[in-house]
Image: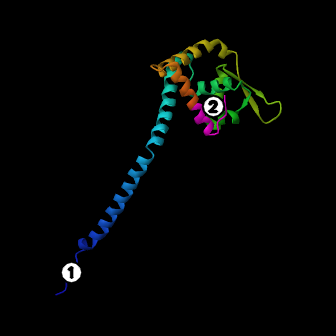
Amino acid sequence: MTQVLLRTDRAKPAARKAKASTDARQAEKERLKAELEVENTLGWLFHDIHRLLGKDFESRIAGLGLTRTQWRVLVTVERTEGGQTQTELADLTEIEKAPLGKTLDRLEAGGWIIRKDDPNDRRARRVYATAKIDKFFPQLAAAAKGTFARTLQGMRQGEVKDLIAQLQKLKRNLGGAED
């Protein structure tokens, strides 16, 4: 008597093998997730805190008519004492050159910045904050103070100083400059 194998009988070993492979991948994924728990938690905390700081600050300066990107660029220009090229600003703000150019156009049209030819490079222009920022600086400072008061609520001054020191250490570990 000849035994006839049905197609479903032949498929069972392949299905078991595929399931075992899927189970192994899932187990490896779970192992890696557990191994990276601290890294994952820190990464998302840094990301979320940055995003939430921006949203809170943006809500506080809504009356100035600046978008989050515009104030980020403007504060970078002011913080670095201006004189930055568009390429330097793109690196500092992590905004691509084309969108940054449009943001600079809007800031210039609003009287927030001016662009001047670079004295050392005919191809480049440097970006400077105008005196307009001085007029609104008290509002920007109050917004920043409000955002950080909310952020640091419940922390003692010593804890805040320790937090700053630890964050500066992380920055140095990643090759960031002191400022």
For residue 116, side relative to residue 23 (left or right): right
Residue 177, relative to residue 151: is it above or below? below
Residue 98, relative to residue 24: is it above or below? above
Which residue type carries mark 2? Lys
Numbered circle sitting on residue 52: none
Which segment did they paint magenta?
167-179
Q: Mark 1, mark 2: which one is toward the viewer? A: 1
Report the quarter where the N terminus lies. Answer: bottom left
Give how far across and how far down residue 64 sits, in percent.
57, 16
The residue that disc 2 covers is 102
Give how far across and how far down residue 83 sits, in percent.
74, 27
Q: Quadrant of residue 132?
A: top right
Say which element carries label 1.
loop
Say which element carries label 2.
helix
Q: Could you give the CA–CA distance between mark 1 and mark 2, rounded to whole angstroms?
A: 73 Å
The residue that disc 1 covers is 4
Residue 42, relative to residue 58: is it above or below? below
Looking at the image, which residue is at 47% across and 21% down?
Answer: 155
Looking at the image, which residue is at 53% across and 27% down?
Answer: 163
